[in-house]
Image (spheres, rainbow, N blue to C red):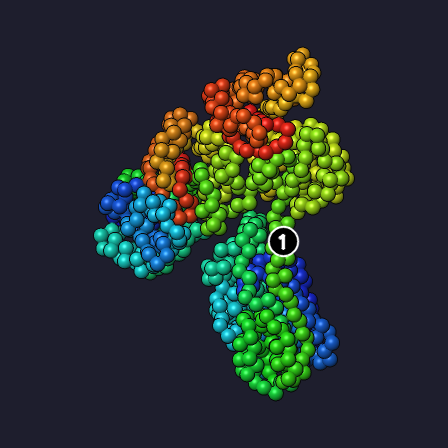
Amino acid sequence: MNARAQAIGLVQGALAAVEAERAYINDLNVYPVPDGDTGTNLALTVRAILDELEAAHGTGIKDVAAAIAKGSLMGARGNSGVILSQIIRGVCDVCSVTGSLDTGHAKRALVEGAEAAYRAVRQPVEGTMLTVIRTMAEAAQDVPDSAPLAALAEHVDRAGRVAVERTPEQLAVLKQNGVVDAGGYGLVVIFGGLLAIATGQAVQRVAAREGRAAEAAREVMALRPAELSRYRYCTSLVIKGADVSRDDVEAFVSGQGDSALVVGDEEVLKIHVHVDDPGAILSFGAKHGGIGAVEINDMHEQTRERDERLAVETQASAVVAVVAGEGNKKLFTGLGCGAIIDGGQSMNPSAAQLLEAVDAVAAADVVVLPNNGNVILAAEQAATMSRRRIFVVPSRSIPAGLSAMVAFDPGVDGAANAMAMSKAIERVHSAAITHAVRDSEIDGVHVARGQAIGLVDERLVAADDELLQVFRNVVGKLAEDEPELLTILTALNGSQITADELARVAQEVCPACELSLHEGGQPLYPILAAAE
Amino acid sequence: MSAELTLENTAIVTDSTCDPPARYWSTAGLVIVPLRVHFGSETYRDGVDLKPPQFFEKLAASRVLPTTSQPPRSEFEAVYRGLLERYEHVISVHLSRNMSGTYEAARAAAEGSPNVHVFDTGNVTTTMSLAVERLWARLARGTTLAEVTAFLERFYDEGRILIYTATLEFLRRGGRIDRASSMIGEIFGIRPLIEINRGHIDPYAKVRGVKRQTEAMVAYLERYAPRGRELHLAFTHAACPEGVPPLREALLAARPDAIVDVEGAVAAVVGTHIGPQAVAFALITEP
């Protein structure tokens, strides 16, 4: 097999490996800018090498090395892609000179690759792919020249994996975010892909970061956005046949922004920089040569998209609740409720309204809390219409809904939440105190219009002219089950009594109870309560 | 060089994040290396320049939020050097490397000293004091390095602490809590419980009300302390000394066999990351 065919096979392996982990590498990306595109940039850079190789004519090792170097330089995307292109270039330079690749040559090639990468970066930072390639090159020197190439590759592969694991110890922003360096990880993935083809083995996932660590990383990253770049646009281009030196180009470019990389030679210079004015860079390039491979990305937009993507992935479940009253809404929101539909007694939301709210929240599973007996049906109907998995937890009152919220965990799926939340409301007895709107006979008790009435679990237990007396009777009824906790949600505006009076009465009637009293602000019901 | 490790030939080093009881500072053969706490440009040695009550007063009064840093490696080197003049062995036990670079600094300082053995307890605060107590007991009866190593490796896995904290603000701000999104406090009477084990700070439960908080803490003890083993406990609090006795009573009522080895108070460094009004107990079982 000729060198070109061999190289194509190897690069295909590398591309397959990096494509397989592209999304994961994107999510690891917090440094230098958390724009979540390292995996994409590395994959596109490797793809450019493959395209160049496939278009190349020569089949000798020198022709192949030249094609690889050119493809990686022209196609390099982002910081990580440019650094990768320099590593590859260093390796290819050695291959071009030696015309063959044995263990001794490969050791030198790795060193040259590492040195080329360091040269490309004005201020090298440890804990990045620079450290990883350097560690790999250093490890290579432990292997005797007489060892087979495969032994060298496996040794270097192991060293790379260890180096990636250590990046959080070297770069604080990685440790804070609970991730390894994305570029370094990508480099080891690519090397692993090459190795897999060379040895005929399946690609081994680098991922020491499976399971818990990866999950934690996602969550932490989603919660705490890393610092944005000062500059907005990631700009890259090539200048062909430049009439100024690399140093002059670098001096100009680095004066315009940060993360500047200028690599290549007079024939083709590749520029990568983060700036606010990409136009200035393009103008400079056009003035001094022919420009091509222009790519401009809005990093702030990328960062936002990455954060959103991670936020969505983080939350396995969300809650949609039907709630009336400003104070009550705040409690639901504070307890992690994802969306609230205004409503309740005498203002029941429709299935369509519920469906709209359910489809708008960012989670795979949604738990719906109707918080009213008359809303449960509509919620169940909405559940059959949504593209999400919906779990209706049949809460019949706002305080019961709050008890359910306490059991909610956004990190577990809807079925688990529904079970825990349903269990939480089973032990809750709800009470509501309002004023009768007409004379009537309810549950065998005569009620006059305007009288205060108290219901426990939707059955009338008290009626009196005095609100406080009804409250006393209601708490007495609730106290029969010797509850541990009494929740009271008030809406006492326009009423003669105060929250302090309610607290005093509650303590008198049910001294063993812990009291949790909040201003709920619900309409029609001066007092809602629950005991559990 | 004797193979048996005893209190006569072995010293213990730990760091101030074990939130030690006062007696630790003056115990011969036990050295506490302080981490640092910074209020703006002022730097204090944890537990040395700033004792727990003063720290919380300062925290309440300060407009700038404190930050913390690990002890310099040179300080560990000096401590180890000094101890090796009088002792044959040093066992150095530290807070989780996930939380601080202290363990790494100690490790680096111990390089080239084969008789200094550095361990990550996978934990922090009074849990570390509990490790010190159990080590001390082993040294008092005579032990071996192999036994110490096996114990501390088991301690990393099995040593754990459950913390009730009135505010999650400090933990959240420091970004030191995993799965923070599921944790809620300071609303609707919710009392969050946080557990630390194997270097991870995780939400354990959120319960409403003091009674359920106590029940949940007792349930935690029952879950992780199998009967038939010797149960050792440690308690601590952050600016909340009144919180310890009721918790101790509840746990001892459930497990009268438990032995309380140590009671400490959260000092400046741990206090910076957990804030005031926390009560906690740590546990380890012994055969």
Residue A338 appears in the picture as rendered:
yes
Nearer to us in this view, B181 or B42: B42
Q: Going 49% across and 72% down the picture, which residue do you hit?
A: A123
SS for callout 1:
helix
Residue A268 left/right relative to A109: right
Given the current orientation, which residue lies at the most extreme bottom position?
A243
Chain containing the residue with disc 1: A
Where the N terminus of chain A falls, by quadrant?
A: bottom right
Q: Which residue is mark 1?
A: A308
In the image, residue A473 above or below residue A409: above
In the image, taking residue A344 as reference, residue B213 lies left or right, namely: left
In the visual, does A353 lie left or right of A166? right
Q: Is residue A49 above or below residue B78?
A: below
Q: Position of residue B181 (x, y in %)?
A: 55, 45
**In the rendered view, would you say B34 is above or below A268?**
above
Residue placed most toward the observer, A508 or A255:
A508
Q: Position of residue A306 (x, y in %)?
A: 62, 57
Residue at (65%, 42%) from the top-left corner?
A339
